[in-house]
Image (spheres, rainbow, N blue to C red):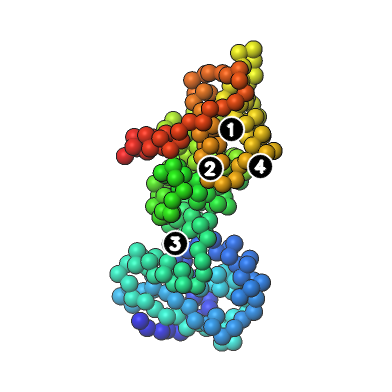
């Protein structure tokens, strides 16, 4: 480990850690909290180096952004002290980032997901996904259970489906159905699954003398659940996913029901079967 002196301008230009979380969002909070004004510890930053060459930042991303924007005073001499950690490569640099970041703050799942997307080379821009508040939905889609898993691995596993879902540019009204959307896209492709969820968002369900189609039924069920405040919590989530899957299957097969209720499918089994097909 070595310590070097570097100008603030040069520190700003050091590449960000591939796993860095949402710097812009963190900066908004930091401006009114610990980075409201310059303090001496702000002068010390951490970076990873290999064979004497700096690879990327380990911390100091938010300070670099605020210095670049002119929203945080720089050190009096406009220099920082950079603590260099010699690493074997980027993977070790990412591991160091995780370690130091965990010591500094409690990780927010949405930030983890943002960092994973960044590392994997894509970003989520739709109203449905851009806040990255989808940790529980990813866990459900992966195992059908609310378990404590590796969010980076989950984002990597669902990368193709997340990108496809994001391109549908759906609104945020049905975030509770994201796991169902991902599973449907994985099985049937984005064109077929996307048509169902786009029509659901637009309230384009069908009602005829034969009854209601899946889109109409699911819309009615969700309206009732919201009015009765039966959408929060894991048990309600799994029931909703099961009902949504029943509605989706009805629509896929062109079926209708005269009864305005929706049976609850075993969504955990659906997930297990579909994910086994991928492997």
Q: CA distance from mark 1 to mark 4?
A: 24 Å
Q: Is residue 64 above or below residue 232?
A: below
Mark 3, residue position: 19
Q: Is residue 93 above or below residue 77?
A: above
Q: Residue at x 59, y 62 (%)?
A: 25
- Extreme-bottom residue of the structure: 77
Q: Tell me: 245 left or right of 270.
A: right
Would you say residue 249 is visible in this rendering? yes
Would you say residue 195 is visible in this rendering? no
Mark 2, residue position: 235
Q: Would you identify the image quadrant in which residue 269 lies?
A: top left
Q: Nearer the viewer, mark 2 or mark 3?
A: 2
Query: CB atoms at circles 2 and 4 under 8 Å apart?
Result: no
Q: Would you identify the image quadrant in which residue 94 lies?
A: bottom left
Dot 2 or dot 3: first in sequence order is 3
Q: Nearer the viewer, mark 2 or mark 1?
A: 2
- Extreme-right residue of the structure: 227
Q: Is residue 119 above or below residue 255?
A: below
Report x, y in % for residue 42.
55, 80
User: In what element is the residue under mark 2?
Assistant: helix
Query: CB atoms at circles 1 and 3 under 8 Å apart?
Result: no
Dot 2 or dot 1: first in sequence order is 1
User: In what element is the residue under mark 4?
Assistant: loop
Q: CA distance from mark 1 to mark 3?
A: 32 Å
Please tell me how many numbered marks the rendered image carries. Answer: 4
Mark 4, residue position: 229
Q: Residue at x 42, y 74 (%)?
A: 47
User: In what element is the residue under mark 1?
Assistant: helix
User: In what element is the residue under mark 3?
Assistant: loop
Dot 1 or dot 4: first in sequence order is 1
């Amino acid at each position: 480990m070595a310590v070097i002196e570097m100008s603030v301008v040069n520190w700003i230009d050091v590449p960000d850690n591939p796993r860095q979380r949402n710097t812009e969002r963190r900066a908004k909070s930091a401006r009114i909290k610990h980075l409201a004004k310059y303090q001496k510890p702000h002068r010390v930053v951490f970076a990873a180096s290999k064979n004497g060459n700096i690879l990327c930042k380990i911390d100091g991303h938010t300070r670099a952004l605020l210095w670049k924007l002119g929203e945080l005073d720089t050190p009096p001499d406009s220099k920082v002290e950079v603590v260099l950690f010699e690493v074997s490569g980027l993977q070790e640099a990412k591991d160091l980032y995780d370690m130091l970041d965990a010591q500094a703050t409690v990780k927010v799942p949405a930030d983890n997901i943002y960092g994973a997307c960044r590392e994997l080379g894509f970003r989520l821009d739709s109203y449905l996904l851009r806040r990255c508040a989808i940790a529980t939905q990813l866990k459900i889609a992966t195992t059908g259970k609310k378990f404590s898993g590796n969010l980076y691995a989950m984002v990597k596993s669902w990368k193709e489906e997340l990108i496809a879902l994001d391109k549908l540019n759906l609104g945020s009204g049905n975030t509770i159905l994201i796991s169902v959307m991902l599973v449907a896209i994985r099985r049937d492709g984005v064109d077929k699954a996307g048509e169902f969820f786009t029509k659901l968002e637009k309230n384009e369900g069908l009602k005829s003398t034969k009854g209601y189609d899946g889109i109409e039924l699911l819309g009615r069920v969700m309206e009732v659940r919201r009015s009765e405040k039966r959408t929060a919590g894991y048990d309600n989530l799994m029931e909703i996913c099961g009902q949504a899957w029943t509605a989706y299957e009805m629509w896929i097969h062109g079926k209708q029901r005269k009864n305005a209720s929706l049976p609850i499918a075993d969504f955990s089994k659906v997930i297990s079967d579909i994910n086994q097909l991928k492997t």
